[in-house]
Image: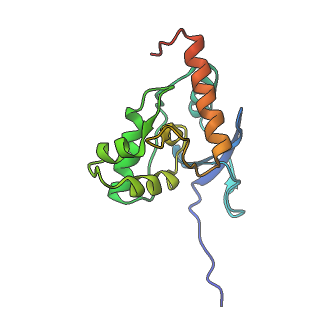
Amino acid sequence: MKQQRTFSPDLFYDIFQSPVGALYLLFTGKTLTGISFIKPDINVRRGNAPALIKKELTEYFKNGRDSFTQGIAFTRGTEFEQKVWFALKDIPFGETRSYKWLAGKAGRPNACRAAGRALGRNPVPIVFPCHRVIEADGSIGGYSAGIDIKRRLLDIEYYIKLNLGGSHE
């Protein structure tokens, strides 16, 4: 007998159309718990995301918003993974850092590969900007949604920052 998964009635998704394609915003109640480039499980119902996150994502893609005030909760992730995800907030808009830098910020300077694996599990990309992490030699590295999307996100940030005269608030 197959065990049926049960889902919280508060769990839902909404779609945000972005310059890099559809983003599936996953919520539990009013709390953002994920952003995915892939449509969620068929058992997750469609709902309406709070206007705040859509406004903030629009501002990110158009004007370079770098901080998000939407409530976020991590429903998974080890202590180290969560340290890695929070360290992403220290990478300025339009800039990149290495996996080694990130591992150091998370308190384990020799754990570059583990930091990279943590990025692959980041449940809230863009808001927690894992696309800003590249290899120490300047090569692009990997990205859970594919390197083409990573390149596009970096390009968007580069051109917004360039249009702002190199400064960003």
Q: Nearer the viewer, residue 68 or 139?
A: 139
Q: Residue 52 at x, y = what percent?
A: 56, 30
Count of numbered badges drawn on the protein: 0
Coloring applied to the structure: rainbow
Q: Residue 74 at x, y = what percent?
A: 44, 52
At 61% from the left edge and 40% from the top edge, which residue is drawn?
A: 150
Q: Compared to 3, does 157 lie above or below?
A: above
Residue reaching furthest to the bottom: 1
Q: Residue 96 at x, y = what percent?
A: 47, 33
Q: Residue 145 at x, y = what percent?
A: 63, 49
The answer to which image quadrant residue 89 occupies is top left
Asked whether the viewer can see residue 48, the reply is: no
| Quarter of the image with the N terminus in it | bottom right
Q: Compared to 120, does 63 lie above or below?
A: above
Asked whether the viewer can see residue 95, the reply is: yes
Residue reaching furthest to the top: 165
At 46% from the left edge and 31% from the top edge, which residue is drawn?
A: 69
| Quarter of the image with the C terminus in it | top left
Q: Nearer the viewer, residue 146 or 19?
A: 146
Relative placement, left or right, of 134 versus 159 is left
The answer to which image quadrant residue 58 occupies is top right
At 51% from the left edge and 25% from the top edge, which residue is drawn?
A: 94
Residue reaching furthest to the left: 107
Q: Nearer the viewer, residue 24 or 21?
A: 21
The answer to which image quadrant residue 164 occupies is top right
Q: Nearer the viewer, residue 58 or 155?
A: 155
Residue reaching furthest to the front: 137
